[in-house]
Amino acid sequence: MSQTPEETRYDEYQNFAFHPHNIYLMLLLFSLTVLFLALSAAFVYTRVQNGLPPVKLPWLFAFNTVILIGSSWAMLQAKKAYLADLTERYQGMLILTIVLSLIFMAAQGLAWYQLFDQQIFLSSDPSAGYLYVISALHFAHVIGGLPFLGLFLWRAYKYMKEPVSVLVYFSDPEKRLRLRLLTIYWHFLDILWIYLVIFFYVNYLIQ
């Protein structure tokens, strides 16, 4: 028996592993992983070759790790609330994710200011340069995710006002897929940041 267009479309979104959106995201995450690993290797090579002193991270880098973990947790809770049809909690967790992300960005700006205050600039030496470039690249990808979070929040308030619209919103497989992809992306940024902080702290301990 042939499937209806609606059933075909539903199966397409259920078949997550091979969906084009998922493939694009996996390619993006793979590219970012290779990029940051290459930068990490270049940092170590440059430091060893030139005998450069380590760069001590400001304490705000550790603080930002906690903030990003909280943001990732909030994003996970938003996804769970969506799957459980909990409108207010879903909206609240999206707001919390955005607020924590903005706090991360503000704190990261202060962390760079702390580096400036220690007379550590982008041009001070290659080690400092790598620190700024790597942290700025991660910062840029957090910024890149915010418009998508904002779009989800806007749609949540626009389309989740009446019982019928709420039911339609929660049962839409396309929205479910996109929320799942955004959650994966947000967790990736969290894991990437934890790796970077540990990497730079370990390099600092190795004199």
Image (tube, grey):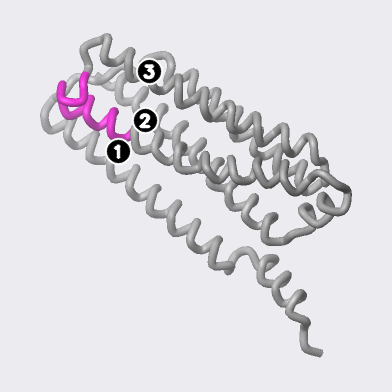
Report which residue position mark 3 lands on: 111
Under mark 2, the amino acid is Phe
Residue extent of the magenta highlight: 121-135
Q: Contact, CB < 8 Å: mark 1 with mark 2?
A: yes
Q: Quadrant of residue 144?
A: top left
Q: Is residue 56 magenta?
A: no
The residue at 65%/42% (across/down) is 154
Tell me what residue is drawn at x 17 percent, y 34 percent.
46
Task: Look at mark 2 in the image and give the residue it sits on.
Answer: 199
Q: Nearer the viewer, mark 1 or mark 3?
A: 3
Q: Secondary structure at mark 1?
A: helix
Q: Position of residue 194 (x, y in %)?
A: 47, 31
Image coordinates of residue 179 in percent, x first then y, are 64, 50
What is the x, y in percent for residue 82?
Answer: 76, 46
Residue pointed to by mark 1: 40
Q: Earlier in the sequence, mark 3 or mark 2?
A: 3
Query: How far across and how far down the image is residue 77, in percent?
Result: 71, 37
Mark 1 or mark 2, which has the lower sequence index? 1
